[in-house]
Amino acid sequence: MAGSRAHSLYRRSGRKGNHPRSGAGRQPTAARTGRRPPARTSADHALRDLMVLSRALFDAPDEGAILRLAMDHIAVAGPYSAEAGYLTVGGDLVLSARNGRTHASAVGRRVRELAGQDGPVAVPGRPWGRALGLRGLEGLHGYLVVTSRSRPTEAERSLLTTLIAHTAAALSVVFAHRRRREDDSELRRLREERTGLQRKLIRAVAELGYERAVHALLAGVAASSGGGEEAVTRALHGLTGLPALVEDRFGRLRSWTGPGRPDPYPEPDPVRRDAMLYAVAREAGPVRVEDRLVALVRLHGEILGVLALVDVRDEADEHTVFALGDAAVSLSLELAHLRELADVERRLHRELVDDLLAGTAGAGAYARSAAVGHDLHRSHYVVVVRWSNRTADDSFAQAVGRAASGVGMRSLLTRRAGQVVLVADDRPPARALYEALARETGTRSGTIGVSAPCDSPDGIPHHYQEAQRALDVRRHSRERYGTTFFDELGLYRILGPGNDYRELETFVQEWLGRLIDYDTRHHATMVETLSRYFDCGGNYDETAESLAIHRSTLRYRLQRIRDISGSDLADVEDRLNLQVATRVWRIVLGGRG
């Protein structure tokens, strides 16, 4: 199938009907300029076929298909025949199923004798034969045994060398994808190898006057510049003179080079967008859609985006069509690489947050957070998000991440127990995160719980429980949707299941801590006085009598309690929290600091 695809690609690139302006109304370029076009030579056709075959090799799904393509189309390089093909499997050379020659065993012995080197091979009836190694960065991928009915010329040898190099490079790419290497330096080396081979082919085409050499440069530009989408649109605009653009799968603009960029860029219509993608996907190569020439950016059948040229005057010729299609192939590799990097980053974030929430991050937490670009030395807040009409899947997690970034939050994110959990390095704005998520999801039926500040990674598991407590209180309150902060819960912090001795101590410390410290330093009894005052229902005479002090002394102490604690005994909420705190201090904690 890959071989027929290579031939079909060749036929399409040369078919006059693909010209957007073909017909009697358009004069050939030579007629307009007054110059006669150079006559095509057999070398021109050979290089054209070799370029088509090269793209087919890189599109092949596995190493077997690559070897079959190279063997079936070896004749594009000259008067050659493929006698045998071998792939390295488990350190041994395995004969391709495509072979069936009677002398295959003799050829196999000779190939193994070469021990990885190139060398001559004797085949009856063929005056010239060579065993050519298919080598990549990892070593020997296999062999291709090639014979010729006549002595190859220097140009034919050069073309054969180029075909062998492209076959080996395609095998390297397949092996790299199979091993699923996610190391950025390895992917960069593979891209550089591919770019180097393309540059060699471009130089060979230029030496022979191949008129399409400049268009093949596009793939090398994208790979070597590291600019990705912007590098491709700049190169396309420079070569064609037409505005070039890249949109994502959903129609949102990612890069534009050239005049006439709409501002604001039109919001895509999902129904029309899907219909357009379906129509373009059914055709081979770029397709005209209204005033644009559109090519899909795909990898293994998945649509990653759209590369297009704005051609309002219908000026695009076959050179423009070829450049756009070739640029789309190169861009597909770049977008796939960016997606892999994003997936790796999200996974590292989730693994770190999961370990922090479980308390298993250990001493390496700071180093791991720095590796993903996050400063864990700052105070952090744990934020728990639940939306009633959304499942906590990757899509919702990404929506939460976008909303958090949109309000200026720097955070790590994971999914846990049907919720999205963030570890943020600053206190979230009171309502901004909830409002941003309401816009992202299109509904306000969501609840957010935020913990108290945490100064150490060791405390994150406890603060995760605080955030969950804040979320639960909000969900069971009259206004169940919105944001609740744990440090604003007051008495609700110690009500309900799941509260421990530590939480009681924290509550007492928050409301009575200053008084306890004062009593310790001055050997006073301010906390005991406040406790007796509440036990007596706020009656001055009964309180003074129970403490065996004068009424004026009690008034003085109560005023000092207000000054030291900063609480207002006349405020209903402060009074309730202080009364509960004194009761917990005396009964649960035994009246100690």
Image (cartoon, rainbow, N blue to C red):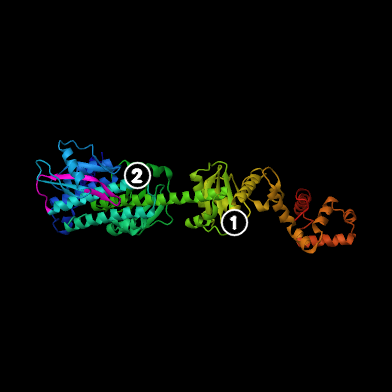
Q: Which residues are magenta?
A: 133-153
> Would you call the spot at circle 1 few (<14 residues within 10 Å), some (14-19), or many (20 or more)?
few
In this rendering, position of residue 348 left or right of residue 463: left
Residue kind at label 1, given as amino acid type? Ser
Q: Main secondary structure of the magenta part?
A: strand
In the drawing, does residue 387 fall left or right of residue 306? Answer: right
Total marks placed: 2
Which percent across, then down, holds residue 562? 78, 60
Residue visible at 23% across and 51% down in the picture: 165
Asked whether 476 or 506 is in front, the reply is 506
* Residue that label 1 marks: 456
* 439 vs 146, nearest the viewer: 146
Q: What residue did someone put label 2 on?
A: 178
The amino acid type of the residue labelled 2 equals Arg
Identify which residue is drawn at 77% across, 61% down.
520
140 inside magenta stretch = yes
Q: Is residue 57 visible?
A: yes
Where the N terminus falls, by quadrant? top left
